[in-house]
Image (cartoon, coloured by chain):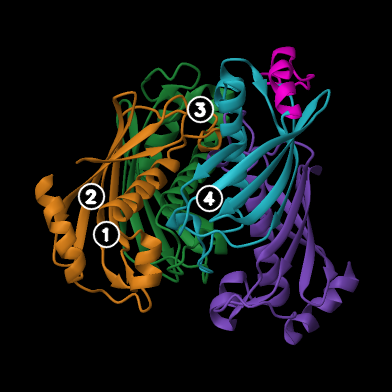
Chain colours: A cyan, B purple, C green, D orange
Amino acid sequence: MTFVHPIRVNWGDCDPAKIVYTGRIPNFALDAIDAWWDHQIGVDWFRLNLDHNIGTPFVHLEIDFRLPVTPRSPLLCEVHLTRLGQKSVSFSVQGRQDGNLCFEGKFVTAFVTADAFRPIAVPPDIRQKIEPLLHAG
Amino acid sequence: MTFVHPIRVNWGDCDPAKIVYTGRIPNFALDAIDAWWDHQIGVDWFRLNLDHNIGTPFVHLEIDFRLPVTPRSPLLCEVHLTRLGQKSVSFSVQGRQDGNLCFEGKFVTAFVTADAFRPIAVPPDIRQKIEPLLHAG
Amino acid sequence: MTFVHPIRVNWGDCDPAKIVYTGRIPNFALDAIDAWWDHQIGVDWFRLNLDHNIGTPFVHLEIDFRLPVTPRSPLLCEVHLTRLGQKSVSFSVQGRQDGNLCFEGKFVTAFVTADAFRPIAVPPDIRQKIEPLLHAG
Amino acid sequence: MTFVHPIRVNWGDCDPAKIVYTGRIPNFALDAIDAWWDHQIGVDWFRLNLDHNIGTPFVHLEIDFRLPVTPRSPLLCEVHLTRLGQKSVSFSVQGRQDGNLCFEGKFVTAFVTADAFRPIAVPPDIRQKIEPLLHAG
């Protein structure tokens, strides 16, 4: 039931310290949340914006870095929905390589109309799909 | 006395929502901290690693997003040293366009030997340069 | 008269070979062409697309890599308009550090309406501004 | 026998024209060549550099853009070895979505010692693995 998004770590993701550059990690986590939308709700951010006129801008993110990430193994990003508010949702993302926790983060996104960037409540059909996932952990 | 790092925002930094992509913002903040090292301590991360065998891996970052960033104005990133511990330092970064706060974040970096990635205390010569900046606010 | 766009090279632009990652170089060149538009024509790609409904998609790019790029010096990108066709324009970009040529490339962009992505001829007002630059070399 | 590297295209890869940003395409092609090394030779660029002290810096790349890339389908990157010289190898990369050619490019990499960045001939054991692939098309 747990959603895990695998990422192939590339040479170009790494910096001269021979590990993935810090600035790439948030991008990996975001890609994992984008994939979560696609898999769990049936639309990724691109379709949500262009086909449904809904945007989910980030209002907060935080990440704790536990271990370096390298290209030696796939990066497995586990995504959980952790909170469903009136106007925003929160996610946790844990990134693991070879079973070891490399980073974990918390991410909060609001909802807006994509065209006018006007804040809206979580749309009812999305809420309906999200709610069971929340209780599933 | 305040260190402000200006960034030219480009077309390629933006996503289909016509604003800078969330994943680019941490990179902007990191570039600003890299520039802070260069300006305040006299060595950027590249020289610190390659010439002085010192790395400063991130252990934590968090960002609150207040307003979208766009290419219409320069992005001014104000960097402050906020804490000097035995083994780590903390920074705040505020990003502004046209005087409006777009994002603000907190960043914590540890110290390691660059070659062996072995944790070390803040090197004395760096501590000496950093301490006055801490009290300067 | 020559347009040169300076770029600060960052730690995060580099890979474990301790030089700028190949994949970053086209991005630097594109940023330089975007800055050329802003400086020479008075609108960058963002404004051209959003305010004027004109897009300039790339149809071709090629780059020869001469010397590695590093964060030790600014990267100076010299941009020249090299051809003005009915429906496309070509640019050359030379990237230099400390007076040494690091890369040089050729870039061709077409013109489209931004909303429908429909091919168009070079718009007359843009052609008028571009033509003198072509002859200026 | 043909090597095809699938890439998930993300929201963050796209620009305000609602297509993948031009500057991302070379990065996709490079990731595909990195994956080719891993699959065909048994070591990716990271291991080649760190474990075998061999680097493969790019000396040339060129790309023709045929159709926009979007997140609506996977991007399938077909990689072929097209030339094996004394000191360099060449690759072609074709990127397709839904069977349509989106871009195609040519890439030339030299060989160096990773530590000293000193030019070397194609190492014999690599040549031995590469030669059959060349004739296989």
Which tag is nearer the camera, tag 1 or tag 4? 4
What chain letter is assigned to the residue under label 2?
A: D
Q: Which residue is mark 1?
A: D109
Residue placed most toward the observer, A70 or C4: A70
> Do callouts 2 and 1 mark residues in contact (Cβ within 8 Å)?
yes
Q: Secondary structure at mark 2?
A: strand
Report the disc number at residue D17: 3
Q: Is residue B15 left or right of residue B99?
A: left
Q: Which residue is mark 4?
A: A75
Badge 4: residue crowd in 10 Å (few <14, some 14–19, many ≥20): many
Q: Which residue is mark 2?
A: D91
Q: Could you confirm whether marks 3 and 1 are on the same chain? A: yes
Between the C-alphas of marks 3 and 4, the distance is: 30 Å
User: Label 4 is placed on what type of residue?
Assistant: Leu
What chain letter is assigned to the residue under label 1?
A: D
Q: Is residue D53 left or right of residue C29?
A: left
Q: Earlier in the sequence, mark 2 or mark 3?
A: 3
Task: Tell me if residue B63 is in the magenta stretch.
Answer: no
Task: Looking at this view, name the residue that lies furthest to the left.
Answer: D135
User: Label 1 is placed on what type of residue?
Assistant: Thr
Q: Secondary structure at mark 4?
A: strand
> Do callouts 4 and 2 mark residues in contact (Cβ within 8 Å)?
no
Residue placed most toward the observer, A92 or B103: A92
Q: Position of residue B18 (x, y in %)?
A: 61, 30
User: Label 3 is placed on what type of residue?
Assistant: Ala
